[in-house]
Amino acid sequence: MTNKSLHYDVLIIGAGAAGLMCAIEAGSRGRRVLVIEHANR
């Protein structure tokens, strides 16, 4: 088993309009972004 460590500069919880806008802005500034969304499906 490979143990791969992932590193992000920004964690955004929620992929609604505001969360995605923040992710786009952070990404455009060179940040590594992780967006987490909760879904019932």
Image (cartoon, grey):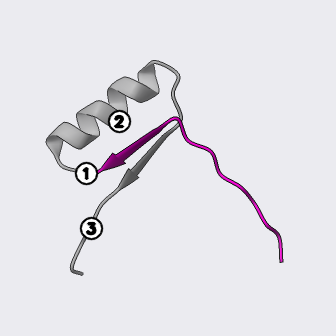
Residue 8 in percent (x, y) is at 55, 41
| Magenta span | 1-14
The amino acid at mark 2 is Ala
Q: Is residue 3 above or below residue 35?
A: below
The amino acid at mark 1 is Ala
Secondary-structure class at tag 3 = loop
| Residue identified by numbered label 1 | 15
**Which residue shows up at 30% across the image and 61% down it?**
37
Residue 16 in percent (x, y) is at 18, 49
The amino acid at mark 3 is His
Q: Residue furthest right?
A: 1
* Lower position in the chain sequence, tag 1 or tag 2: 1
What secondary structure prevails in the magenta region?
Answer: loop
| Residue identified by numbered label 3 | 38
Q: Are marks 1 and 3 in contact (CB under 8 Å)?
A: no
Q: Residue furthest left?
A: 17
| Residue identified by numbered label 2 | 23
Disc 2: CA contacts within 10 A as few (<14), some (14-19) or many (>=20):
many
* Lower position in the chain sequence, tag 2 or tag 3: 2
